[in-house]
Image (cartoon, grey):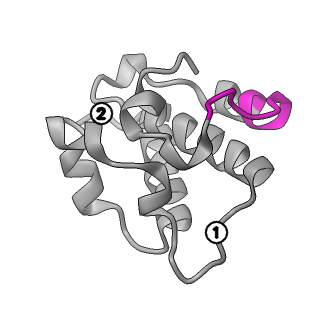
Amino acid sequence: MRVTEKCDVYSFGVLTLEVIMGEHPGDLLSSLSTSEAKGILLKDILDQRLPPPTNPEMKEVALTVAIALACLCSDPQSRPTMYHVSHKLSSSKGLLLEPHHTISFCQLMDLEI
């Protein structure tokens, strides 16, 4: 395996999900490539030790998870650069997905980030 910036981008995606979930996302990562991911709701993977996010916060969480999922693309060439990730995180106001309690991983994986 050749170590490139795309490895760092993948690691960023894993770490981001770990912070949001409150645990290592190993099981989630293995299910992303299967049809199981379609049924996973964003609200169900959030760290349950924290209070649920408000609607404005959920927009930011959804954006962050969508970016993390883009970083986890199995094809390294299809992953964003860290510059692109940084730009998206600092300039975006959140995603326009409604209602927020029904956002699925499938929707987040299909977004253009």
Cα gap from disc 1 to disc 2, whole angstroms: 40 Å
Of residue 21 and residue 85, the one placed in the foreground of this image is 21
Choose between 104 and 6: the one closer to the eye: 104
| Left-right relation of 5 to 63 | left
Q: Quadrant of residue 3?
A: top left
Q: Nearer the viewer, residue 51 or 15?
A: 51
Q: Are marks 1 and 2 in contact (CB under 8 Å)?
A: no
| Mark 1 or mark 2, earlier in chain | 2
Q: Is residue 88 magenta?
A: yes
List the residue tagged with mark 1.
52
- In which quadrant of the rendered image does the N terminus lie? top left
Give the magenta range: 87-98
- Coordinates of residue 36 in the picture (x, y in percent): 18, 43
Question: Does residue 34 appear in the picture of this structure?
Answer: no
Which quadrant: the C terminus? top right
Image depth: mark 1 or mark 2 in front: 1
Q: Residue at x 74, y 34 (%)?
A: 94
From the top left corner, tell me how far across and down residue 53 is, in percent.
69, 62
Q: Secondary structure at mark 1?
A: loop
Residue wearing tag 2? 2
Classify residue 107 by image quadrant: top left
* Residue plotted at (64% across, 38% down): 63
Can you say whether 93 is above or below 27 in the image?
above
Residue type (three-letter) at the residue carrying disc 2? Arg
101 displayed left or right of 29: right
Name which residue type carries label 1.
Answer: Pro
Magenta stretch contains residue 58: no
Q: Residue at x 19, y 35 (%)?
A: 33
Considering every residue shown, the one lying at the far bottom of the view is: 49
